[in-house]
Amino acid sequence: MAQIIVPTWVANFTSFLKVTLAISLRHAMIIVIRYTLALAAAATVLAGCSRPSQTSKAVDGSTNSSIQTSAPRLSQSQALEFAKRAAEREGTRLSYYKEPEAHYKSKDRTWIISFTHVNPRPVPGYFEVSVDDRTGISRVVRGD
């Protein structure tokens, strides 16, 4: 078998290249990781800032700009319709009740619809229906 004789300078240059490339790749990976983490942090901040909000109104009609709420997906009339259907599915005769009142709870993202019985009131004289604003799922809650 023939042996290949490599000059010393070629062997030294090859070793130099191996070490240089290993160091360069390590530094390149560190830079890529740092930029990736910085980009992920910036994307998280931007995603948190992009959520729409609206100023809530107090019961007396005044606005308080320090309280931020998310706007409901369902309209009040849609929430009322979901609540009426849920009550009728349970056998409730809505003609025995006054026109329901709907209130949106932005913290829970639910509509609360209150039904009050017309006089003379049986016990219980009221019930509520909670409507999930995200899904439209309705749940009837009877009074005590």
Image (tube, rainbow, N blue to C red):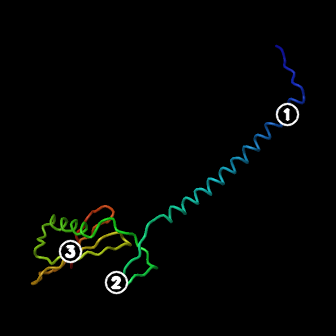
10 Å crowding of disc 3: few (<14), some (14-19), many (20+): few
In primary-sequence order, the first of circles 2 and 1 is 1
- Disc 2 marks which residue? 61
The alpha-carbon separation of the residues under discs 3 and 2 comes to 30 Å
Which disc number belongs to residue 13?
A: 1
Rendered image: mark on residue 142: 3
Q: Is residue 11 above or below residue 44?
A: above
Q: Residue at x 31, y 61 (%)?
A: 135
The percent coordinates of residue 109 (x first, y second) are 35, 69
Q: Secondary structure at mark 2?
A: loop
Callout 3, which amino acid? Arg
In the image, 66 versus 36, the foreground residue is 66
Q: Earlier in the sequence, mark 3 or mark 1?
A: 1
Identity, as a three-letter code, of the amino acid under mark 1: Phe
Which of the labelled discs sits on residue 106, or is there none?
none
Amino acid type assigned to the residue bearing label 2 in the image: Gly
Q: Marks 2 and 1, how far apart in space?
A: 81 Å
Q: Quadrant for the C terminus, please.
A: bottom left
Relative side of 27 to 108, left or right: right
- Tag 2 and tag 1, C-beta contact below 8 Å: no
SS category of the residue bearing label 3? strand
**Disc with the residue nearer the chain's start (3 vs 2):** 2
